[in-house]
Image: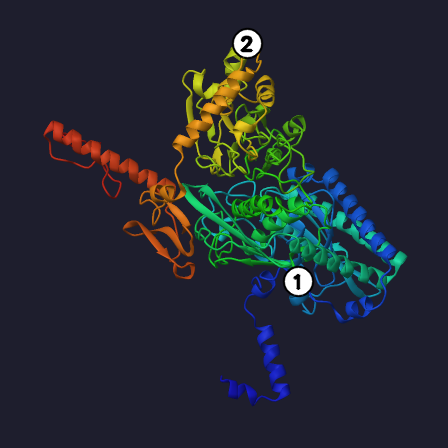
Amino acid sequence: MTDTDAAQFTAQEQEFLDAFLAETTLFLGPDPQIMNDHRMAPRTADEDRLLSGPVDANDLDRVRKRLVAGLDEAFEMMGQTGAAPGAKWGDLTSAVYSASGDLIHISTGGVLAFASVLHYPVRFINKYWINDPTVGVHDGDAFIHNDARYGNIHNTDQSMILPVFYNGELIAWVATIIHEGENGAKEPGGMPSSSESAYDDGIRMSPFKIVERGVIRRDLLTFLQNSVREPKLQYHDLKVKLYSALRIKERVLALVEEVGRDAFIVSLRKSLEDIEAEARRRISALADGTYRVNFFSDSTLRENVLLKYACAITVKGDELTVDWRGTAPQIMNRAFNSTLGSSKCGMNQAFLGFFWPDLPRGISVMNPIEVLTDEGSCVNPGPDAPLGQSLQSTFKTFGVTQALFAKMQYSNPEKYGSVIAPWFNQINTFLFGGVTQHGEFVGNVCADLNGMGGGARAHRDGEHSMAPFFAAMADIGEQEIIEDDVPFLQLISKKIKRDAQGFGKHRGGMGYEIAVAARGTPLWGFATVSSGSKFPAIPGLFGGYGCPTYPLAKIKGINVFEQMRDDPSTWSFDYETLMNTRPFAGARYSTHHMGMGFELADEGEVYMICQGAGGGYGDVLDRDPEAVMADVEAGYLSGEAAREIYFVVNDPATLAVDTAGTAAARAAERQARLRRGRPYAEFVKLWVTPEPAAHLPYYGSWGDDNSVIHATAWTTHGPARVAAPANQLPQIFLPDPNVVALAAQQARIDELQTRVSELEGAPETPLVEPGGSSQTRPGESEGPEGS
C-alpha cells in the first residue's frame, strides 16, 4: 500500500484500518518509545491550568512530607513481614508516581534504583492496558511485573503497581518492589551467571493484572507459583507487596481528602519541576568541559575476558551529556548485559545517592541529562540478549559515573556530597539452592552483598563494609536468624580481611571474609556471581589504589565438621591461612574466578570469598604514619604492607613509628619514583599500541577512538579478532567453557597418546573414537567380548 492509497481512505475506513491493526498486533513487546525516554512527561492541560495560579507552599511541603512518611511506613511493613532475604535486609523500596507515571517520591530507606525505573511499566500500562477492553485499569486493580526489558533492574525484582482513583479519576500510581531472588531461572536464586539466552533468566513478567477489583487472580497466582522453585515465597511476598501498596494508597487518599484534589495534583507536578530547576542550577555551577574515565570488568562470569566500560561526561551550561560509547558489545550468550533503562538506573543512583544526596528523589533530575550509547552494547543490548546478571553492567554504569563526580565537583566551592573515591560495586556473596533442614526446596541470595566497602573521602578514610552503594540503609543480616532458615553455616562470618583495602592518603573501607559450608541437608549447592578476580573492580582516586582482586577458594572432598569435631585446632578463621597451610589431609584445595555457576556441595565442603573494599584517595606517602600503625594494631594491615606500601618504619614489637626512619624511607621512595618516571611522550611510545594484544580477549574501544569496537568472535574455525563500528559488528557468541575445557583435555590426551605410541613403536590407535565407542590402547587388542 502506498501513501497515495492511504490518502484515498475515508475517515471511517481509516478508523476501521487503525482498529484492525490495533486488534491484530501479534505481540506487545517492550516499547522503544517508552523505554528510551527517561525524562518526565510534559504537563497535562489540567496541570498547566492549576500551575498558572498561585501555589501554596505549605500545601506543597505537607504533601511531600506526608507522602514520604507513608512510603517509609510501607517500607517498614515489607521489611517486617517479607519472606525473601531481600525483604528482611532492606533490598526493597516503595514509591509514588503521577498519573502519567513520573516518579515523585520514594521511601527514605531502600533501593533508589528500583523506583527510578518503574515509570517505564506504568507508562506501558497507561498506553496499552488502560483503554484495552480485555484488560482495563479500575479502582482496586493491581499489576505485577519483573521483566527488565519493560522497565526493571533485573528479573529477581518484583514490583506491585496500583492505580489510585479519586472520585473516579486516576490521580496517581503507587508501587512496592522487593528483591525476591528466586524466579525460576536456570540457577536457583534468580541471578544465573550461566545464562546463555534470555529464556534462561527465569520468569519474565510484562506488566499484567494480578489483582482485579480487590481480589487476587488465583489462576495467575498459580501460574506464578508454578514457575518458581519457592511457591510459598512467591505467594507470601506477593501479598506483602500488595498490602503495603494498599497502605500507601490509603495514605494518599487520606491526604487528598485533607488538602484537596487540586492541591495534591499541583504538589506532585511542582515537586518534579522544582527538582529539575535545582538540578539545572547545580549543573550550571560546574566548570564546562569533558571528564573521562574507563572501568574494566575481567569476566563474563563464565570466562576471563577484559570488558571495557567507557564514560565521558560533558558539562555545557545547564545540561550534562553522559557518553558510554565505546563500551563492550553485548555477548549474546552471556548474562552480564544490562538494558538501557537499567543502565540509566545505575547512573541515577550515582546522582541521587552520591552527587546530590539532598535532592528529593524524583525522575525529573534526569531531565537535563542526555545519555549516549552504542546500540548493541552491553549497556544497551538488543531484546534477545540474556540479562540474568545485568547487575554486572548496571553496577559499572554507577561506578564510572560516580568516579567522575569527584573530578567534576572538586574545584566547585559548593558541594552537596563528599569528594569520594569509587565505592565497591560487585556482588561478592553466595547464591544458594537446595533442600532445607525443614524439607523445603529454596533458592536465593545471601545478604552479605550489602556489606560493600565505602570509598575513601578527601578528608577521611572510607567506612568498612558500610552498605551497598544502591541502598544506604540496607542490612547484612543476622547469621543466627539465617541459620534458622537455611542449612549452611558461616564458619568465617564477616571478619575484616587484612590488607584487603584500597591504599591511599585515606584508605578505602575494607571488606570481610566469609566461609560457608552446608550441613544437615540431602541436597545443597552454591554459586557466586561477581567479577574482579584478576583485574580490580574499581580504581582509586587522585593517586589512591583501587581495591584488590578477590578469588573464590574451595576446600572439597572432605567434611570439615568432622575434622573440627575430631581436632578443632585444624580450623583457622582466615581463609588465606587455610589455603596456604592446607590443614586437612586428603582435601582438594583450589582457587577460581568469582563467576562460579551453581554447583552441588557435599556436607562440610568449604567455599570462601571476601567482600570488596572501596577505593583509596590520594598518595600513600601522604598517609599519617600513626593512622597506618593504628590499622596494623587493629589487624587491618600487615607489618609488611605498612613498610612496603606506606613506607612506614616501625618497631614490630611495640608498633611505634620511627618518625625519622619513615621520613627517610618516603623521601627515598619519591626519588625512586622520579627515576622510574618517564616523560609523557616517551611513556606513550612505550605503552600505547594501535590495538589490543593478540592474546588478550578484549571487548570495547581502544585508545581515543570510541567509534571502533574490538572483540573476539567465535567461528567454526575458532576465535577471530574483529574491529568495526558497533553497528557493523557480527553477533558475538562465546563457546561453552566446559566444551573448551574438554577440547583442551582431549588435545592433551592426543598428545600423550602420540608420545606413548612413539615410545612403544606401535601404530597410533585412538583412545577415544570420534563416536565415543570402544577404547583400545597401543599394543592391545579387543577381547572376544570387547574390552
Residue at 83% x, 60% y is: 264
Above or below, comparing residue 462 to residue 696 in the picture:
above
Mark 1 or mark 2: which is in front? 2
Relative to the observer, which residue lies in front, 587 or 347? 347
Q: Colour scheme used in the picture?
A: rainbow
The kind of secondary structure element at disc 2 is loop
The image quarter containing residue 133 is bottom right
Q: Position of residue 177 (x, y in %)?
A: 68, 48
**Residue at the extreme left of the image, as rendered:** 761
Q: Position of residue 417 (x, y in %)?
A: 67, 42
Which label was assigned to residue 199?
Answer: none
* Quadrant (top left, top right, bottom left, bottom right) of the C terminus: top left
Residue that label 2 marks: 653
Disc 2 marks which amino acid? Ala
Q: In whole angstroms, how far apart are the C-alphas of marks 1 and 2?
A: 66 Å
Q: Position of residue 704 (x, y in %)?
A: 42, 52
**Residue at the extreme right of the image, as rendered:** 258
The kind of secondary structure element at disc 1 is helix
Judge from the rendering whether residue 779 lies leftward or rightward of residue 508; answer left or right. Answer: left
Above or below, comparing residue 415 to residue 775 in the picture:
below
Judge from the rendering whether residue 132 lies leftward or rightward of residue 701; answer left or right. Answer: right
Residue at 60% x, 42% y is: 181
Residue that label 1 marks: 123
